[in-house]
Image (cartoon, rainbow, N blue to C red):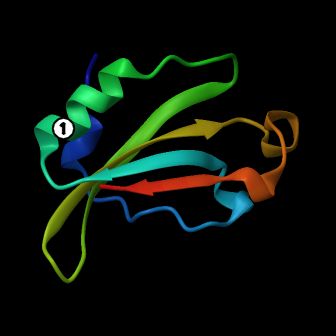
Amino acid sequence: MLTSFLNEYRSLPVSDASNRVVSWHVFRTISEAEEYAESIRLGDGQRIVGGMDADSVGKLWWVGVEVDDIACWGNPAAVNKHAE
């Protein structure tokens, strides 16, 4: 799997259904983010997204799943965020 998207700046998603990112995990090392990205299994209308960002502690990487249609995916209130 190509994880070159992890080297591009993209801010963390917010818990807002309009961005269509329904699940994401945050990592402190790029190797952990790459390993997680390679374990994701996608359904129709889903794709892996992510990038590099930073917070007050330092650099971070995030990996998530973006869906074509949040209404077809399910309840927008069920959007999941996981930090490690």
Q: Quadrant of the N terminus?
A: top left
Residue 3 is at least partly visible in this image = no
Q: Quadrant of residue 45?
A: top right
Looking at the image, is 69 positioned above or below residue 39?
below
Is 71 left or right of 63, judged from the image as shown?
Answer: right
**Left or right: 72 in relation to 50:** right
Q: Position of residue 58 (x, y in %)?
A: 13, 72
Q: Residue at x 47, y 48 (%)?
A: 24
Amino acid on which the number 1 mark rests in the picture: Glu
Q: On the image, which quarter does residue 69 sit in?
A: top right
Q: Residue at 31%, 20% (x, y): give it.
A: 38
Neighbour tally class for label 1: few under 14, some 14-19, many 20 plus, Cα within 10 Å: some
Name the one closer to the observer, 39 or 47: 39
Left or right, 28 with respect to 81, comes to left
Tell me the element at label 1.
Answer: helix
Residue 75 pos. (x, y %): 84, 48
Identify the image quadrant of the C terminus. bottom left
Residue 57: where, in percent of width, then height? 15, 77
Tell me if residue 42 comes above or below residue 33 in the rendering: above
Work out whether 11 lies above or below 23.
below
Residue that protrudes farthest toward the bottom in the picture: 56
Residue 23 shows in this picture: yes
Q: Residue at x 72, y 60 (%)?
A: 18
Quick one: which residue is furthest to the front in this view? 84
Question: What is the x, y in percent for residue 70?
Answer: 78, 44
The residue located at (66%, 49%) in the rendering is 20
Q: How many marks?
A: 1
The residue pinned by badge 1 equals 32
